[in-house]
Amino acid sequence: MSPEERKYFLKNSLFNQPIDFEKEIDGTVYSVNTFFNPDAKESIQEKMIRILGLKEQDVEKLSESD
C-alpha cells in the first residue's frame, strides 16, 4: 500500500477520531494513549488487521463501503 493510500485508509476508516482520548464508563475514567514505534516491523494498518483477524477481502470490503 502506498503512503497516499495508507493515509486515505486511516483517515476514512478505522481512525476517524482522535486515538488519544478519555472515556467515562460507570463512573470510572479510562485514559487511552497511543505510542507508535518508529522501528516497528508492521504498519498500524497491518497490526489492526492482524489483531482483528481480518482477511484481505474483508479489508477491501471495508474500503469499498465508503
Image (cartoon, rainbow, N blue to C red):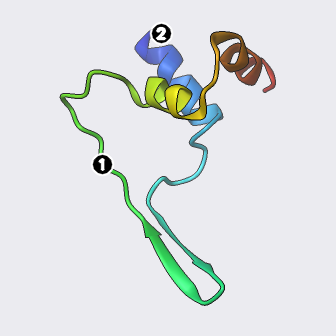
Q: CA distance from mark 2 to mark 1?
A: 22 Å
Crowd band around label 1 with a 10 angstrom C-alpha radius: few (<14), some (14–19), many (20+): few
Helix, strand or loop at label 1? It is loop
Which amino acid, mark 1? Phe
- Residue in the image at 47% along x and 16% along y: 4
On the rendered structure, is 61 left or right of 15? Answer: right
**Extreme residue in the bottom direction:** 27
Q: Nearer the viewer, residue 17 or 44?
A: 44
On the rendered structure, is 45 left or right of 27? Answer: left
> Which disc, if any, is residue 21?
none
- Residue in the image at 30% along x and 48% along y: 35
The quadrant in which the C terminus is found is top right
Residue that carries the numbered disc 2 in the rendered image: 1
Residue 43 image point, x, y percent: 38, 25
Residue 65 image point, x, y percent: 81, 24
> Which disc, if any, is residue 35?
1
**Extreme residue in the left direction:** 39
Q: Quadrant of residue 47?
A: top left
Q: Nearer the viewer, mark 2 or mark 1?
A: 1
Mark earlier in primary sequence (2, 1):
2
| Relative vertical location of residue 11 with respect to residue 9 in this rendering, above or below | below
Which amino acid, mark 2? Met
Residue 18 image point, x, y percent: 51, 54
Crowd band around label 2 with a 10 angstrom C-alpha radius: few (<14), some (14–19), many (20+): few
- Residue in the image at 44% along x and 59% along y: 20
- Residue in the image at 41% along x and 16% along y: 3
Helix, strand or loop at label 2? It is loop
